[in-house]
Image (cartoon, rainbow, N blue to C red):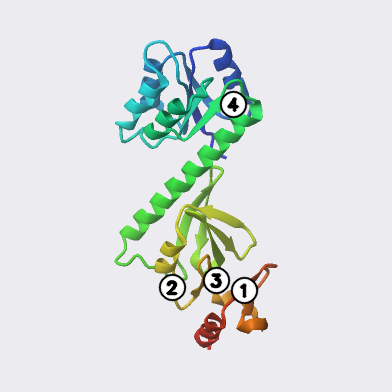
Amino acid sequence: MEQKTILVIEDDINIRSNIIEILEQENYKVIDCPDGECGIEKAKEFLPDLIISDIRMPGISGYDVLRELSKDKETRTIPFIFLTAMVDRSDFRLGMELGADDYIFKPFKMQELLSAVKTRINKHNVIIEDNINKLKLSERDSDLYVPEDKFFISVNGRQTFITIQDIVYIKAENQYTNIRIATGKSFIIRRAINTWEEQLPEKLFLRIHRGTIINMNHINKIEKLSGGRMSIHLQAVDEEFIISKRYASKIKKDKN
């Protein structure tokens, strides 16, 4: 697994040392700074995978660090977590308006720190992966996938490719979608289900209702239910999908 680099900006040496110890025990590479000026320099030099910064520091504050890094195209997308003892709502709002991804409040528990770090790094990986996929599509004459196409995904630092025809179903989860593939594994992708519907080959995939798209090659059986509804059972999937009679008729028509 690729080792992730985290920049810690904290003027309290005891807190900074504690954070460094926790992160290094989890195999993160840590760069530390005692003030905002140093933090800006190190962020631009090392381009870390995540920045954890105190807000109130002598000289340049954590807010100023975030403002400065937001001006640089190489640092503006780095996930940024504020470390603070403040709980004032206006301070919290200011940080979010500046683009902060999360807050960790002092005093914090080790698991709180690690959970926030893992969440932000994983979400950033999803965004990077989605941008790569968009770039690949933009290089083609069409943005439509074909069954043999593969798209890139990064999970916990490990890179893999998923073949379009191996997707069993796609389910909407807010602005993300959950993809289930033939091996039984599932992945969360930062892409709206409407975008998937536009790009997937329509002869292979069908949107059965607002929140779900299925691969018709993976249909095991279709059963009639009361009230004119139907249920679809996919191969190697325990969950059944309830659909309208109209959609069920379309599936039968497309598969014939």
Q: Earlier in the sequence, mark 1 or mark 3?
A: 3
Q: Say which of 3 and 184 sits in front.
A: 184
Q: Disc number at residue 201?
A: 2
Q: CA distance from mark 3 to mark 2?
A: 11 Å
Q: CA distance from mark 3 to mark 4?
A: 41 Å
Left or right, 220 with respect to 151, comes to right
Q: Disc number at residue 242?
A: 1
Residue 102 visible within the image: yes
Q: Nearer the viewer, mark 1 or mark 3?
A: 1
Q: Which residue is mark 3?
A: 214
Q: Quadrant of residue 241?
A: bottom right
Residue at 58% in and 21% down: 106
Residue 99 visible within the image: no
Residue at 57% in and 40% down: 1
Please determine whether, in this image, residue 5 is positioned above or below residue 249: above
Type of the residue with mark 2: Pro
Q: Earlier in the sequence, mark 2 or mark 4?
A: 4
Residue at 49% in and 24% down: 88
Q: CA distance from mark 1 to mark 3?
A: 12 Å
Please determine whether, in this image, residue 144 is positioned above or below residue 95: below
Q: Nearer the viewer, mark 1 or mark 4?
A: 1
Q: Nearer the viewer, mark 3 or mark 2?
A: 3
Q: Which residue is mark 4?
A: 23
Please determine whether, in this image, residue 191 is positioned above or below residue 21: below
Q: CA distance from mark 1 to mark 4?
A: 45 Å
Q: Earlier in the sequence, mark 3 or mark 2?
A: 2
Q: Earlier in the sequence, mark 3 or mark 4?
A: 4
